[in-house]
Image (tube, rainbow, N blue to C red):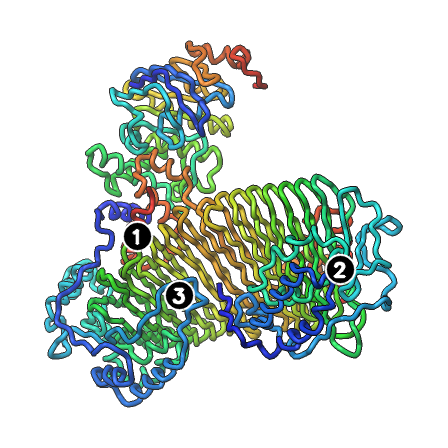
Amino acid sequence: MSTPTPIRGATPQTALPYTEQFERLKAGLPGSGLDWVDALREGGASAFAVNGFPTVKNEAWRYTNLRPLEKVVFEPAEPRSDAPGFDVLPTVRAAGTSATRLVFVDGRFRHDLSSAAGLPNGVEVAGLADRLAGDPDWIAGRLGRLVDVDANPLAALNTAFLGDGAVLRIGRGVEVAEPIELVYVTLGREDRATVFHPRTLIVAEPMSRAVVVEHHVGYGSGVTLANHVVEVDVAEGATLHHYKVQRESGTAFHLSHGAVRIGKDACYDSFILTVGARLSRNEVRAELAGTGGTCRLNGAYMVRGQQHVDTSTFIDHAQPHCGSREVYKGAIDDSARAVFQGKILVRRGAQKTDGHQLNRALLLSDTAEIDSKPELEIYADDVKCSHGATAGELADEQLFYLRARGIPKDEARGLLIGAFLAEAIEEIPEDTVRENFQALVAGWLAAR
Amino acid sequence: MSGTQETVDQVRAVTEQSYKYGFTTDIEADLAPKGLNEDIVRFISAKKEEPEWLLEWRLKAFRAWQAMEEPRYWAKLSYPPIDYQDAHYYAAPKTSNRPKSLDEVDPELLRTYEKLGIPLREQEILAGVEGTETKMPAIAVDAVFDSVSVATTFKAKLEEMGIIFCSISEAVREHPDLVRQYLGTVVPYTDNFYATLNCAVFTDGSFVYVPKGVRCPMELSTYFRINQANTGQFERTLIIADEGAYVSYLEGCTAPKRDENQLHAAVVELVALDNATIKYSTVQNWYPGNEDGVGGIYNFVTKRGACRGVNSKISWTQVETGSAITWKYPSCILQGDNSVGEFYSVAITNNRQQADTGTKMIHIGKNTKSTIVSKGISAGRSNNTYRGLVKILPKADGARNHTQCDSLLIGDQCGAHTVPYIESRNRSARVEHEATTAKISEDQLFYCRQRGLDPEDAVSLIVNGFCKEVLKELPMEFAVEAQKLVGISLEGSVG
Amino acid sequence: MLEIKNLHATVDGKEILKGIDLTIGSGEVHAIMGPNGSGKSTLSYVLAGREGYEVTEGSVTYNGMDLLTLEPEERAAEGVFLAFQYPVEIPGVANTTFLKYALNAMRKRRGEPELDALQFLKLIREKTKALNMSDDMLKRAVNVGFSGGEKKRNETLQMAVLQPRFAILDETDSGLDIDALRIVADGVNALRGADRSMLVITHYQRLLEYIVPDRVHVLAHGRIQRSGGKELALELEEKGYREFGVDEAA
């Protein structure tokens, strides 16, 4: 709607280092030489060259200023075989049980740390680079299909450099009981700022069912930029539960563009928990592309210090009889700032749409800030849509009640913040994931 | 009991002609040549015998405007480019002198206002007769016809209390210090494209000053009428409520049916000092264009009130049923501690109308409160957008906002959109926003018809119910007209 | 008063009424009993003229008129009143406003003078008293926030004010406790008269203890299966609808 008209031929100054990197590196990227891969990358590179980094004049970015990111030239992360700084990889599984887990370090798939134990037949998991090198045909036509690089500059940048990441294929009718875990570890380097562009492709074929958990963790104190793109295709009658927890280090920039297509009678259920990074943005664009589809985008964020967290979602009701639910809750402390932009579009003819959205933010300090922009754009009359947004601090009465029962002030506050966030997290049906996320909330509260 | 039944009665009374204010008045007019340049700005200023400072201010605005870009992207509106050179920026009924009383006003003009349902003369006469029901009249009217104010009723009566109610041109002549002290202090001349244009070329409008401690005993009202073809209307209204004062002000608007689009770019500034209250109500019924979207008014209006004093209050109520395009965000700057801002809005779009309207509530002072209730009704092939900003600044301890936005869609070819911006930088502030969207259900329609209502009356009744929270904020005299309009503006929207 | 002949009706292409024959004379009260899904509510909607209920065969003659050609509001003006099983909520529209408008719309259609505010107020005061309704209920928006009992009392009030010639009571007893049922039934009985007919639709016999019908019909599978006097209702209470090929726990 408010995308500025691109001016051809004038690459913004801050985009130049990346267009140069692209020219320098493109021949060596995985899958280079495959026509469709080259075309995809060139398309991404030229879209980014035209638009550069989005500015606050771009309505979709009005509350998230990428100036601090533009001031640094990020170098592409190099492959590494070490894994310093961590010894236990995050998981939602109980210790000792076998796991399907793909591990990526600075954006590269690591065979040595990954395992695909216990997967049923009909499920394929692989690193994208391996897939491009060995068996590219299946991903051709699927990769890049859901992402509009012209409208999303960072997704364009990712597409230019796409090389590694995860590819998941849940075969027709297959049900995977155990969560498939994707672990993205950011290590970075002390001596320079590094960037990587992981690309994740998840295809849930008709009538399949799976649970995917993404962990994003950071170690070290180098400046890093993780520029993710996640493409998710939930085909007819399939169900995908997709969870993400982001706890990168305080020097990290974490940007993620999710593009989700939900087919007829399919269900996409997601939850994003954000704790980490100096600046993070989770952008999800979900299209309800068949009748009877269901989309749930839930999440929670907890930020402090100078952190900036941006949640920008767009739910596109393109077909009738679909439902969408969105509940986001956040706690903002110190001088942190949170942004929530959530748009529901109901297209002409998408009758019987049922779309609801809620964002509630707790401001915990005098210098915290929340900017919220829920949005409805509706072109069909027989629909039920609503959104709600609140901002404020803990209710005085509740706090007083707890203190009157002898609970010290700080503890009472912790209890109430925990209860506030728990309301969102309790929506997660998978016990293991829910408990894991609850523990992370408790950890964040304990560090207050 | 509300006036809803009257609504429906009146809807029934209206037959095939849905826009009944579409006539033109044949009156000789004084027109500036088409086009916009510094000479035109000087021409307008000279016509109004303005002091030098005001001409300078206009020129500064004009120069600023030339460097500005028309805001064409962020609002959900689409229209062909406007040729700002292809309009007259000054049109006035030709009269030899400024009328001192209604006796001197051109009878043709008085007849026009009578047709519009505003009998200026009758009002004064009635009020002057002993033994009539009300000694104090309910409404005083300032009638603005194209670029000039043609009559203001009950001035003398108000003057006794120290209340100034006159055209802004007259205020510039008679009360220059007050005008100079406040003009442009709420909406500066650099504010936005349309407001800046208005600063350069505004022709007339109303001026109100209510002195300390005075409660204005009657509704003050301005009735705006665009008559002349190929003109823009740029009125400017300034209302000041001094400490402890109260005033309720109403504004009504109509225009003839014409095939070309006419531009209306008004600016309204309100200033409320300590403990003062201003209630500002609008029933906007500019010509909306025909069913195919030909003609109609482009309504680009900047309305803003400053609650400067402690405990001050500004309340906007609007019923927007007219105009081809509405771009309007009556706002409150809540500077004074404990000040209160309110925005109650009904916006109805039908056929090809487009409305992008809402409010801004800027909380600066402590314990400031704001309430927003917006009811949008879309029918035909129209688009109706609520766009609003609630901004809580760091010092606004204890600020409160509650926003309720409801949309009603009639038919499957229209659009209803809600775009709120909520920015809070104070933890003790509490902001709540809720928006819903709904349709008139088959059940409701059938229930009403089973009880004997025909479908159009049923829709009118249901929509009036939907808007009730807002309509009840209107002064009595306006509420009836507004309810009637709700029904009329939705005619033809149900099959 | 009302003569239904071989009435067939479909909803969404599915035939629900499969040939109803029913004659109701002036001043008579008939009851239609039947299991869930037998077509009871469909019959009431067809008689009131709801869209989406398509008559494919048969006729309905009402006081000599072809009822099926009339719009819903025209039927209302002719004195057809449907007391809804689920009365509809209309937010923001006060109960009295709604009633006054409905009454005057009908009076106007019939060429009768409209009531002014005072006359109307007097009328409504009198009617509400009989139904034990509070002023508060009159001021509230139509059916919004009403309990089940309040809604049904409100329907009865509307009937009392509008004075129909033919009233259809669609499951008026559903959702009512015994006290509320008694109030509603008293209200309905007060309206019985030589020139007013009624069709009482119900699943249970309970309501018919209070509104005693002249005739009882059993509707099942889209047809009237049996007709009889008021004792038929008791028989059904005892035996259920099994005899008509319907198996359900009563």
Q: Using the image, determine if residue B77 lies above or below residue B241.
A: above
Q: Position of residue C221 (x, y in %)?
A: 48, 17
Q: Are marks 2 and 1 in contact (CB under 8 Å)?
A: no
**What chain does badge 1 belong to?**
B
Residue at 24% from the left image edge and 61% from the top image edge: B259
Residue B165 location, quadrant:
bottom left
**What chain does badge 3 belong to?**
B
Q: Using the image, determine if residue A125 lies above or below residue A75.
A: above
Please give the residue where the numbered disc 2 appears in the rendered image. A129
> Which of the two residues, C136 or B255, is positioned nearer the viewer here?
B255
Determine whether the residue tagged by mark 3 lies in a helix, strand or loop.
Answer: strand
Q: Are discs 2 and 1 both within one chain? A: no
Q: Position of residue A89 (x, y in %)?
A: 83, 59
State the mark number for residue B55.
none
Q: Quadrant of the C terminus of chain C?
A: top right
Q: Are marks 3 and 1 in contact (CB under 8 Å)?
A: no
Residue at 58% from the left image edge and 77% from the top image edge: A12
> Which of the two residues, B285 or A230, is positioned nearer the viewer here?
A230
> Mark 1 belongs to which amino acid?
Ser
Q: Position of residue A6 (x, y in %)?
A: 51, 70
Q: Is residue A404 visible?
A: no
Q: Using the image, determine if residue B281 lies above or below residue C195.
A: below
Q: Position of residue B434 (x, y in %)?
A: 51, 56
Crowding at dot 1, Cα within 10 Å, few <14 / some 14-19 / many 20+, comes out as many
Q: Is residue B462 left or right of residue A214?
A: left
Q: Are discs 2 and 3 both within one chain? A: no
Please give the residue where the numbered disc 1 appears in the rendered image. B489
Please give the residue where the numbered disc 3 appears in the rendered image. B315
Mark 2 against mark 1, which lies toward the viewer?
Answer: 2
